[in-house]
């Protein structure tokens, strides 16, 4: 490639993030095609299936085959018969773009489905939250060399990051994290999630559906995301950067020096 820096043109090598078309095929039936960074694809398939309520637990899905083709990847998945019948009723046939969490949904009810109420969850100190946010960029190995991918991380109650997944799509990164957590049997009541993107409503929807009680985003939330978090019981944090953050829903799970639990307020 050519690089223009400080008034000078040079030839240089560079690393770029890859994205490929990944088809999810359930019980022999194509369901959707998403543009995904081609890493941790079994985590992605599991997380997508959980966060989209296709299955209720990781043990209900089996990756039978991964076919790497010239134009993409096919993930051949097996799910129980009842899950498959419900899936056929929903329908989803369009391709999902890199930045799209809803592409292919056939109805508003399917797209904006309310997640189950989020119960329990841990109490996290402000120090732990800030610690986790400060760590995530250093833990994004792919983003460090490409500058082009989102990250989703899982931290324990002390703010130590235990898992990181990356992808060109913010919702794909979260699905990969959800899948990794489920496949490893991580207790979702013993930590919280941090994402490097904005907190759009599908990020809240996916987190709540998976059972994540606290979601912290480095960027802003949307109004629909705030309303969904308020209604389902998820603690939503936005603008988490530089030691600061805003809490938009259910702040009772956050604790500060010299205080007990914070009063429940979305203001």
Image: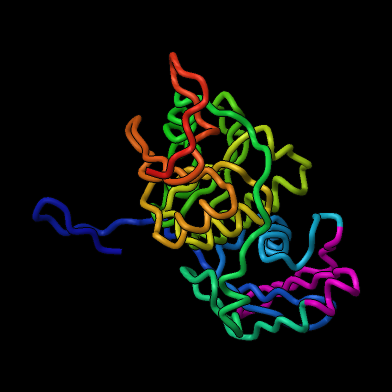
Between 135 and 51, the one nearer to me in the picture: 51
Q: Which quarter of the rendering shows the N terminus?
A: bottom left
| Extreme residue in the left direction | 7
Residue 116 placed where, x, y %? 68, 57
Q: How is the image coloured?
A: rainbow
Give me the residue at 42% from left, 40% from top: 247
In this rendering, does residue 13 appear at all? yes
Q: Is residue 156 magenta?
A: no
Give me the residue at 79% from left, 59% from top: 56
Indicate left or right for 92 with 223 as reference. Answer: right
Q: Is residue 73 magenta?
A: yes
Residue 156 placed where, x, y %? 61, 30
| Extreme residue in the top direction | 258
Give me the residue at 69% from left, 36% from top: 189
Indicate left or right for 43 with 139 as reference. Answer: right
Vertical order, 92 against 136 (above or below): below
Between 48 and 64, the one nearer to me in the picture: 48
Question: Which stretch is magenta?
Answer: 60-86
Between 192 and 174, the one nearer to me in the picture: 192
Indicate left or right for 122 with 151 as reference. Answer: right
Vertical order, 101 against 8 (above or below): below
In this rendering, does residue 128 appear at all? no
Give me the residue at 73% from left, 59% from top: 46
Q: How many numbered callouts?
A: 0
Residue 148 placed where, x, y %? 41, 57
Residue 187 placed where, x, y %? 73, 37
Q: Which quarter of the rendering shows the C terminus?
A: top left
Indicate left or right for 179 with 108 as reference. Answer: right
Between 92 and 141, the one nearer to me in the picture: 92
């Amino acid at each position: 490639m050519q690089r223009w820096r400080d008034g000078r043109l040079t030839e240089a090598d560079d690393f770029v993030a890859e994205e490929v078309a990944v088809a999810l095929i359930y019980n022999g039936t194509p369901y959707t095609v998403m543009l995904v960074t081609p890493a941790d694809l079994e985590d992605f398939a599991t997380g997508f299936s959980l966060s989209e309520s296709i299955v209720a637990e990781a043990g209900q899905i089996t990756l039978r085959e991964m076919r790497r083709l010239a134009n993409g990847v096919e993930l051949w998945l097996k799910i129980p018969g009842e899950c498959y019948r419900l899936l056929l009723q929903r329908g989803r046939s369009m391709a999902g773009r890199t930045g799209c969490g809803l592409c292919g949904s056939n109805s508003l009810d399917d797209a904006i489905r309310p997640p189950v109420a989020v119960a329990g969850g841990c109490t996290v100190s402000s120090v732990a939250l800030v610690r986790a946010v400060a760590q995530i960029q250093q833990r994004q190995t792919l983003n460090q060399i490409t500058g082009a991918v989102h990250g989703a991380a899982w931290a324990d109650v002390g703010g130590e990051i235990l898992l990181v997944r990356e992808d060109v799509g913010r919702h794909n990164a979260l699905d990969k994290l959800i899948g990794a957590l489920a496949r490893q049997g991580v207790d979702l009541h013993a930590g919280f999630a941090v994402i490097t993107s904005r907190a759009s409503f599908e990020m809240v929807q996916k987190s709540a559906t998976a059972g994540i009680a606290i979601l912290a985003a480095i960027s802003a939330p949307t109004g629909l995301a705030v309303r969904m978090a308020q209604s389902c019981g998820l603690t939503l944090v936005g603008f988490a950067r530089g030691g600061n953050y805003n809490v938009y829903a259910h702040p009772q799970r956050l604790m500060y020096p010299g205080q007990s639990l914070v009063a429940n307020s979305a203001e």
